[in-house]
Image (cartoon, rainbow, N blue to C red):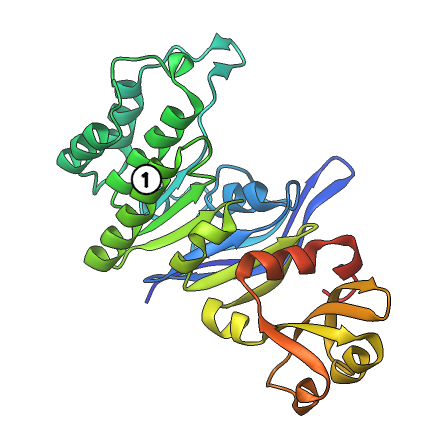
Amino acid sequence: MSVLSGKNIVKKYGKETVLKNVNIEIETGKIYGLIGRNGAGKTTLLSVLTAQNPATKGEITLDGNPVWENEKSLSRICYSRELSPVTMFGPNNFKVKDYLNAAKAFYVNWDGEYAKELVKLFNIDIKKKISKLSKGMMSAVTIIIALASKAEITILDEPVAGLDVVAREQFYKLIIEEYSETGRTFIISTHIIEEAASLFERVIIIDNGEIKFQENTEEFLARAYRISGDADAVDKATEGLKVYHPESLGRNKVVTVLADKPDENFAEGVQVEAVSLQNLFYAMCTNEGREAM
């Protein structure tokens, strides 16, 4: 089993610290979901892990070998991020076929026939300039490159941005099919949590430049509860537990908690409900929940 590892990663831009002593391990053969609010450090973390951005401090390795300036390690990783219709020199006049040819030259396992199938599936005109594509079409190009790269570790940063619901469902289906057939590792960073949650074998939550949780998604959600009822009963039921996003309405109270095992007090005068990944993330990342994290 291969491991992409980041140890004690710090990333600073001037006086601002974007990543704060991050430790992360990505094992091959799993689908990871990376979630966090805007500005939490998701894109910075991914760019550092893939040597597109140097860490201020820390070490990034793949199977114990450095990733930075290591062609052998980098050839095993594909980081596909949002394309931009403009560059620092003006409109992005590269054509889709230029990006596909560049990917073919870089990724040793590039699957040209699969790329053609995906181009047809997403109805992409490869002769078109990037600057002339819609946001959804640009997202489709990043997906095509990521999947056709056949890279051992494939990272997609906001891959469904701008895609309509049909194209998003096509993407999720493609990920499942490719994972089932090849066992490739995928890391998917997305804001559309509810749709993608069922894909994630493991979830990584980043907040304010720090990794808060790295867990098996099913086990993580099995510990999460939404507790509601009379405020005193809720306080008693959740005593000693991490409480997120408390809400009060008159004498009633609603909280989200993480418990290592079901608490017997839950049965006494409170209502207990399961929590979706999106709702758990919301509860944990609201201002009221930050101290608990």
List the single residue furthest toward the left: 113
- In-image side of 118 versus 2 (left or right): left
- The answer to whether residue 8 shows anywhere in this view is no
- The spot of residue 103 in percent (x, y) is 28, 31
Residue drawn at x 39%, y 31% as measured from the top left: 139
Considering depth in this image, is 221 or 99 the residue closer to the camera?
A: 221
Residue 186, given in percent of the width and then of the height, sits at 37, 52
Identify the residue at horizontal 25%, vertical 18% (top origin).
Answer: 125
For the point 71% across and 88% down, the residue is 268
- Which residue position is annotated with label 1? 146
Q: Camera-side residue: 267 or 102?
A: 267
Task: Give the total number of marks visible in the rendering.
Answer: 1
The quadrant of the image that shows the C terminus is bottom right
Tell me if residue 77 can be seen. yes
- SS class of the residue under badge 1? helix
- Picture coordinates of residue 228, whole percent (x, y): 71, 72
Q: Is residue 9 left or right of residue 268?
A: left
Image quadrant where residue 97 sits: top left
Instruction: Identify the residue shown where x is 41% and y is 59%.
Output: 198
Q: Is residue 198 left or right of residue 278?
A: left
Q: Amino acid at mark 1?
A: Ala
Above or below 161: residue 94 = above
Q: Quadrant of residue 250?
A: bottom right
